[in-house]
Image: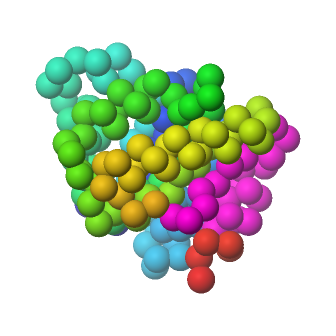
């Protein structure tokens, strides 16, 4: 069990969302004195997300519920977070994230899309009982070419 868990909600493997989520997870875990974190990647879960009793999805849900700090990354799609991420999070029981500190991370083409999706994601995480940080991370356009630099900047702002 890792204290820090990262969810990548992009349904495609190797996405810039996954790269940014991983970089943020590395920096936040290191700031907490831990060199590791657990990763839940919806791209790896694939169609199993929709299968009742899928072993990999069940393990992913347990990993998420065991977190003390949860970094949830998603691309902004059609004004909100990804459907694959929603499918995963909808399988959590009520208040499953009570006592968990959650960090929303959103990638998008333009800032207004990112801001809207970040607000919706923060609201969903709160609905699940999480304590959501005051400001999540949004990364747009050219920033996505340098996920490590974006993660460094965000981590230095959020970690005191």
Using residue 86 as the reference point, say whether residue 8 is left or right of it. right
Residue situated in front as seen by the camera: 25 or 69? 69
Kindly indicate the quadrant of the structure image that contains residue 66.
bottom left
> Can residue 23 be seen?
no
Residue 18 in the image, given as x and y percentages of width and height:
57, 40
Using residue 153 as the reference point, say whether residue 55 is left or right of it. left
Residue 72 in the image, given as x and y percentages of width and height:
48, 48
Q: Residue at the spot x=49%, y=35% of the render?
A: 9
Q: In the image, is residue 56 above or below residue 47?
A: below
Q: In the image, is residue 31 above or below residue 93?
A: below
Q: Residue at the spot x=23%, y=52% of the render?
A: 95
The verdict on residue 7 being magenta is no
Question: What type of secondary structure mainly makes up the magenta span?
Answer: helix
Quadrant where the N terminus is found in the figure: bottom left
Quadrant where the C terminus is found in the figure: bottom right
Residue situated in front as seen by the camera: 6 or 128? 128
The stretch of residues the image draws in magenta is: 133-155
Using residue 104 as the reference point, say whether residue 65 is left or right of it. left
> Can residue 87 be seen?
yes
Residue positioned most to the bottom: 160
């Amino acid at each position: 069990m890792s204290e820090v868990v990262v969810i990548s909600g992009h349904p495609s493997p190797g996405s810039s969302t996954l790269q940014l989520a991983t970089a943020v997870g590395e920096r936040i875990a290191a700031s907490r004195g831990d060199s590791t974190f657990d990763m839940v990647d919806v791209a790896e879960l694939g169609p199993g997300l929709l299968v009742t009793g899928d072993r990999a999805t069940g393990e992913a849900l347990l990993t998420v519920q065991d977190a003390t700090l949860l970094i949830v990354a998603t691309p902004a799609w059609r004004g909100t977070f990804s459907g694959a991420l929603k499918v995963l999070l909808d399988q959590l029981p009520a208040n499953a994230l009570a006592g968990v500190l959650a960090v929303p991370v959103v990638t998008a083409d333009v800032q207004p899309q990112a801001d809207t999706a970040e607000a919706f994601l923060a609201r969903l995480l709160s609905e699940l009982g999480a304590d959501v940080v005051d400001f999540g991370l949004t990364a747009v356009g050219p920033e996505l070419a340098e996920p490590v630099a974006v993660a460094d900047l965000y981590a230095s702002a959020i970690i005191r």
